[in-house]
């Protein structure tokens, strides 16, 4: 991943409030080290259930707030 600084955040106006309550641009990481779109598609293809739901892989659950299944 490469650090994009505030470049991408400026385009999407992604901000946070600092400790003093002032709005600042976040810093973003570019997903160039990993083809994020293709990785997501691979997870969807490999973990889709017959009813269309997606089982969240065990390794990703901590990042999904413990959610184990995605449903439409």
Image (tube, grey):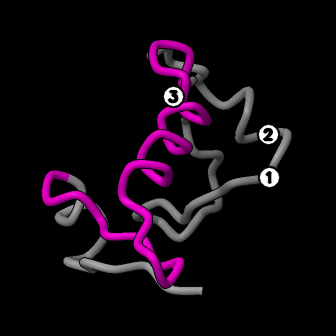
Q: Nearer the viewer, mark 3 or mark 1?
A: 3
Q: Is residue 23 magenta?
A: no
Count the labels in the image.
3
Q: Nearer the viewer, residue 50 or 45?
A: 50
**Considering depth in this image, is 37 or 47 the residue closer to the camera?**
47
Element marked by disc 3 = strand
Residue at which label 1 appears: 13
Residue assigned mark 3: 29
Is the C-beta separation of discs 1 and 2 under 8 Å?
A: yes
Q: Residue at x 14, y 60 (%)?
A: 58
Residue corresponding to mark 2: 10
Vertical side of 52 occupied by 2: above or below: above
The residue range painted magenta reads: 31-59
- Residue 67 placement: quadrant: bottom left
Say which element carries label 2: helix
For marks 3 and 1, give the CA distance. 15 Å
- Label 2 environment density (alpha carbons within 10 Å; few <14, some 14–19, many ≥20): some
Picture coordinates of residue 50 (x, y %)? 45, 76
């Amino acid at each position: 991943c490469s650090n994009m600084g505030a470049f991408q955040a400026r385009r999407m106006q992604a901000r946070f409030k600092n400790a003093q309550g002032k709005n600042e641009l976040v810093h973003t990481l570019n997903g160039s080290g990993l083809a994020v779109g293709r990785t997501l598609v691979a997870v969807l293809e490999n973990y889709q259930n017959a009813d269309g739901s997606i089982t969240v892989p065990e390794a990703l659950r901590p990042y999904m707030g413990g959610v184990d299944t995605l449903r439409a």
